[in-house]
């Protein structure tokens, strides 16, 4: 956890702006975007705050299935059937 | 109506992964029709021909494949898609395989591959440079022989620019096609990933005549009763001026039990007449209200951040790692069908108190919920616009094991293993600023992935936008997607 005297969200917002400007300054397309002022429509909101499902890291189940190897014997599953949306109709 | 047989591995210490890959495959083929999933070791002679097509995901190296399966694949008249391991069992059983099918494997290539090009000529569609996680060290099958009769469907591009096939197809002795993919496309998935090539290859097997069609969805994310209505009006007006229907999520109950924001707590939708009017206004401008949980946070605790509505996860426990990545811990302590149903009923009451019917669409907060929560949602909603989590036990009938879980985004509408109609969620959200190891995700990134997404012949471009970010991000993204040929439609039409 990051320790800071600043409230967490304000800390993230401040550091986020600095990092964004540093990271994007070399890309003219992105630099143009950075210059656009944020609208403080939601007080205290920290950009990039919600990261569920994002990121190329090993704890993200949307990137990599989670679980450990095990040797516990499991019964062989039976066949399972499921319905479709039938959107494509008859081929 | 199509039907697909999904065959998966079960043996070995990683055998449980086979069930997760089968779930993901079943979700995808549900777009086309019904499916049956079963362990490949249970395969019985003649089953292939009972289906429109079959998929086998070889995830366990050395899975003991039944001879009945190998024999039926070799002599099939049914299209078969085989991914990754154990193809050597087929070629060993049929020494004539190389001469009949026109190719043979040589071994796994462990080069760093960060790009997969798909589709390739003779397809008339434009080749897209799909992403691949370069650090994926599982290897991709390479080939000892390839005759002229083999169609290379996609190519791996090594860091030095050289290529070798990622997927190929040829015809067997009885006219059935075998599509072989040299790796497992269901791991290391990101936006614009080579996973999309797998998603598109299913059309060849199941509905090869499907016309190309590219539609788009946009969601306004995480709106709670405290949101600025003037901003919402500006966004709705602009989308309406561009003839862009849209979804907007409403969290009906704002709470902040730890007083992290100082905005107050227990703020209901009905207590904000301006927000009620704005919802009506957005609906008049082509907006479709979507449920985004009851509170979009959990209890009076950080889950994982601060307990504030819109910031925390509601239906699943999450903790933060030291590097600020998240751990998906599992269901919350109270989790049950009745608990989830009670939250949906509470949300429904708040919508009704504000004069609205319960939305027919849901996005679970933070893209996370338990199997029973997803099941509970089936009783309240007809569509889900989101990415979802899937755990072992859903096919095997064993108790759900939340230590074995995978998430998935859909490139097109499916009916997932929970039975819900799940809409495409291909592009993620606009995130203007980086967050520790998470890079910013700007319109240029989303548009670039939407370009890659054209690899799916009926693929959707689907993204979300927080209205507290500059409207210019939304404007650039919508314009960029339109320029790529996408047509925005209402989430109720997806």
Image (cartoon, coloured by chain):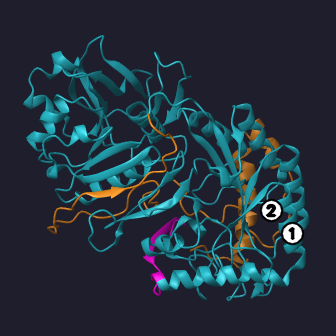
Chain colours: A orange, B cyan
Residue under the image location 48 percent in, 27 percent down: B209
> Which percent across, then down, holds residue A30?
75, 42
Task: Provide the residue span drawn in magenta.
Answer: B321-337
Q: Is residue B92 left or right of residue B182?
A: left
Assess disc 1: are there few (<14), some (14-19) or many (≥20) residues with their C-alpha within 10 Å of its C-alpha: many
> Which percent across, then down, holds residue A75?
16, 66
> Vertically, is B290 above or below B269?
above
Q: Which chain is mark 1 on? A: B
Residue under the image location 90 percent in, 56 percent down: B234
* Quarter location, residue A52: bottom right
Q: Is residue B77 left or right of residue A26?
A: left
Nearer to us in this view, B86 or A4? B86
Q: Which mark is residue B228?
A: 1
Nearer to us in this view, B422 or B391? B422
Secondary structure beneath label 2 = loop
What residue did someone put label 2 on?
A: B468
> Which percent across, then down, holds residue B223?
75, 68
Nearer to us in this view, B294 or B104? B294
Tell me, yes or no, if residue B52 can be seen here: yes
Between discs 1 and 2, the one toward the N terminus: 1
> Which percent across, then down, holds residue A54?
55, 57
Whether labels 1 and 2 share one chain: yes
Alpha-carbon span between mark 1 and mark 2: 8 Å
Assess whether residue B326 is covered by the magenta stretch.
Answer: yes
Assess disc 2: are there few (<14), some (14-19) or many (≥20) residues with their C-alpha within 10 Å of its C-alpha: many
Assess whether residue B455 is covered by the magenta stretch.
Answer: no
Secondary structure beneath label 1 = loop
Image quarter where the N terminus of chain B lies is top left
Tell me if label 1 and label 2 are in contact, CB under 8 Å.
Answer: yes
Residue under the image location 30 percent in, 62 percent down: B395
Q: Which chain is mark 2 on? A: B
Label 1 vs label 2, nearer the camera: 1
């Amino acid at each position: 956890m990051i320790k800071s005297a600043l409230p967490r969200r304000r800390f993230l917002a401040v550091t986020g702006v600095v990092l964004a400007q540093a990271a994007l300054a070399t890309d003219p397309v992105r630099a143009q975007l950075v210059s656009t002022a944020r609208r403080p429509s939601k007080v205290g909101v920290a950009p990039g705050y919600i990261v569920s499902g994002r990121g190329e890291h090993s704890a993200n189940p949307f990137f990599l299935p989670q679980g450990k190897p095990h040797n516990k014997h499991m019964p062989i599953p039976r066949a399972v059937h499921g319905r479709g949306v039938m959107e494509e109709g008859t081929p | 109506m199509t039907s697909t047989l999904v065959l998966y591995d079960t043996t070995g210490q990683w055998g449980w992964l086979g069930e997760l890959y089968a779930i993901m495959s079943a979700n995808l083929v549900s777009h086309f029709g019904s499916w049956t999933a079963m362990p490949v070791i249970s395969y019985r002679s003649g089953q292939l021909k009972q289906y429109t097509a079959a998929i086998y995901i070889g995830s366990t190296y050395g899975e003991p494949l039944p001879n009945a399966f190998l024999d039926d694949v070799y002599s099939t008249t049914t299209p078969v898609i085989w991914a990754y391991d154990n193809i050597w069992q087929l070629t060993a059983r049929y020494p004539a395989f190389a001469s009949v099918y026109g190719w043979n494997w040589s071994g796994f290539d462990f080069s760093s591959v960060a790009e997969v090009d798909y589709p390739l000529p003779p397809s008339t569609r434009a080749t897209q440079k799909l992403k691949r996680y370069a650090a994926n060290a599982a290897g991709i099958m390479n080939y000892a022989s390839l005759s002229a009769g083999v169609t290379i469907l996609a190519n791996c591009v090594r860091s030095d620019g050289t290529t070798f096939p990622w997927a190929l197809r040829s015809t067997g002795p009885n006219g059935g096609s075998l599509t072989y993919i040299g790796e497992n496309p269901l791991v290391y998935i990101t936006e614009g990933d080579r996973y999309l090539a797998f998603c598109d290859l299913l059309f060849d097997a199941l509905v090869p005549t499907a016309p190309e069609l590219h539609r788009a969805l946009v969601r306004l994310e995480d709106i709670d009763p405290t949101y600025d209505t003037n901003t919402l009006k500006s966004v709705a007006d602009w989308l309406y001026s561009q003839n862009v229907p849209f979804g907007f999520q409403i969290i009906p109950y704002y709470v902040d039990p730890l007083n992290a924001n100082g905005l107050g707590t227990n703020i209901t939708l009905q207590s904000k007449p301006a927000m009620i009017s704005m919802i009506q206004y957005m609906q008049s401008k082509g907006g479709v209200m979507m449920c985004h949980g009851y509170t979009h946070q959990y209890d009076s605790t950080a889950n994982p951040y601060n307990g504030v509505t819109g910031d925390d996860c509601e239906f699943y426990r999450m903790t933060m790692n030291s590097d600020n990545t998240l751990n998906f811990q599992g269901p919350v302590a109270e989790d049950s069908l009745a608990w989830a149903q009670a939250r949906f009923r509470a949300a429904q009451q708040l919508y009704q108190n504000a004069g609205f019917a319960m939305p027919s669409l849901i996005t679970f907060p933070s893209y996370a919920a338990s199997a029973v929560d997803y099941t509970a949602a089936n009783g309240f909603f007809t569509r889900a616009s989101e990415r979802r989590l899937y755990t072992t036990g859903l096919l095997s009938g064993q108790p759900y094991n939340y230590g074995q879980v995978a998430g998935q985004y859909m490139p097109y509408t499916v009916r997932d293993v929970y039975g819900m109609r799940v809409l495409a969620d291909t592009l993620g959200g606009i995130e203007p600023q980086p967050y520790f190891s998470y890079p910013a995700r700007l319109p240029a990134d989303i548009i670039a992935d939407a370009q890659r997404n054209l690899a799916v012949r009926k693929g959707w471009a689907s993204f979300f936008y927080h209205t507290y970010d500059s409207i210019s991000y939304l404007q650039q993204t919508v314009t960029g997607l339109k320029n790529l040929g996408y047509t925005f439609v209402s989430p109720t039409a997806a």
